Amino acid sequence: MSADPITEERAPYAPSERRLAREAYRRSRTRRSALIATASTLGVAAVLFLVITGSPGWPVTRKTFLDPHYAREALSPVLHGFVLNLELLAVCGPTILVLGLLIAAARTLRGPVFLPVRLLATAYVDFFRGFPLIILLLLTVFGVPALQLQGVTNDPILLGGAALVINYSAYVAEVFRAGIESVHPSQRAAARSLGLGYAQTMRFVVLPQAVRRVVPALVNDMASLQKDTGLVYVGGAIDAVAAAHIQVASSFNYTPLVVAGLGFVILTIPMTRYADWLTRRMDRRRAQGGIV
Amino acid sequence: MTVTAPVLRFESVRKAFGEQVILDDVSLEVPEHSVTVLIGASGSGKSTLLRCANLLEEIDDGAIWLDGEDVTDPRVDADAVRRRIGVVFQAYNLFPHLTVLDNITLGPRRVHRLPRAEAERRALELLDRLGLAAKAGEYPDRLSGGQQQRVALVRAIVSEPRVLLLDEITAALDPELVTEVLAVVRDLKEQGRTMVLATHEMAFARDVADQVCFLADGVILERGTSEQVFGDPQHERTRRFLSRLSEAGRL
């Protein structure tokens, strides 16, 4: 380094009055914001509490929907029912993701050979996205056994699961397609320029980027699926919701349904947190550079 | 220049997007181990010419020959043609989800079926030569523009293409980063690589070009050595283009 008169004469950095004053001001603003936030939260909570508990029907409502005695009683059968919800989620979730990805990929295929595949995939999505899930469930769970086909199951759980897969695959396919189309064409151009074929370009360049972008949307769909697994009760399967209903029918107290509802919320939270963690990890890996 | 057959030959190439004619009867020969520089205003057809050679665009008429093969014949396997051509884009187009090393080895491993170790050895050797070996494990968005573009150059040459197409590869870079990228291109010329480059860096073009083509409205208006085109332009439009650039301090 050459001797530089400017840097040589420089004293070590000390925060100026101006900086200290600004920081003090920002600190005071932060304290004020925290105070306001606390006060407003407490205020809203108090108002809600007073309005609800002060309502004329509150004592009856509380007894009907939030009775600890019935909650305890319902816990075991409802938890038992949850096993079915979880099983359905564990089987249908991955199936839907794979099927959705295949349908999305089929919709983006080019070339005349693939016209029927493309048309079929498009028709599938158009139809099943519009068709109400509950009607589809009733049709599969009662319609398929009515056909009396040899070797086809009559199990309402399996048929209900199939209906969920059919319906959700259409939604998930659209999410994947949006992801695929969000990858800039220049990425394809670069991949093709390396000599990668269409399928290779999809597999190594487009899909990895597409899937990362749609993780939050997919988690959304999976959370929704988790709740809709409860709909298989229309075929007579006993899941958490059906188990709660049975309790309600014998006691005329609705607390078991609230218990089941809270159970679904508790199940959804870890899934959302997991997806957040996954996204963060991917970002961090990129930001740090990672190890090959 | 040698008498060997050209690596790349454009024969009366015509390309239009709808009503707009981008390339109008363009003929050009790119001899082996030579550097051809395309100059001309934006929209003159430089990029389109390169994209046509790489079969990213379909030409309307004429033919493009790579090593004596008409690659614009629809029966030709486009992927097999692209395997023999290296391309670097203005916006780098590195794959953001892959590390520098994986960006470079993707082609060798998946297209040329090299074992991973061999592909990585080659990639690291090239990265090392460009002083980028330490960046092998980084993701592209952690690199400066100049570093990204040098990685893109490595990615383009790692499979030893017959010809390298460089499409305004310094246009998106800060002036101080341009230098480091152009140094690499100069190096590639020294190695005898066959290149076609579209550029606005006139001083550089003058320096490295064996052949300069001035394009205007999809036509090669003027072609010659850099002494001829830069030193003694014949066409009025070439003269105007060059004088505008020198007024702007780009020459």
Image (cartoon, coloured by chain):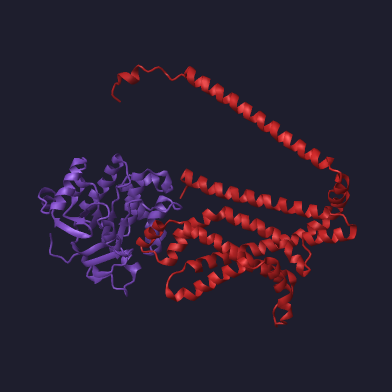
Query: Taking the image as drawn, is residue B5 in sight?
Result: yes
Q: Position of residue A157 (x, y in %)?
A: 73, 69
Q: Position of residue B138 (x, y in %)?
A: 43, 46
- Locate residue B105: give its quadrant: bottom left
Indicate left or right for B247 with B105 as reference: left
Q: Position of residue B85 (x, y in %)?
A: 29, 62
Query: Chain A in the picture: what colour?
Result: red
Relative to the observer, which residue lies in front, B58 or A193?
A: B58
Q: Is residue A130 above or below residue B41?
A: below
Indicate left or right for B209 with A29 as reference: left
Q: Position of residue A235 (x, y in %)?
A: 76, 69
Q: Is residue A117 above or below residue A54?
A: below
Relative to the observer, which residue lies in front, B207 or A24?
A: A24
- Circle count: 0
- Locate residue B192: give its quadrant: bottom left
Query: Taking the image as drawn, is residue A67 in sight?
Result: no
Q: Is residue A240 above or below residue A13?
A: below
Indicate left or right for A56 with A275 as reference: right
What residue sits 70% from the left and 63% below the top?
A88
- Locate residue A102: give its quadrant: bottom right
What residue sits 79% from the left and 52% below the top?
A258
For the N terminus of chain A, the quadrant is top left
Chain the render paints purple: B
What residue sits 50% from the left and 69% below the top?
A106
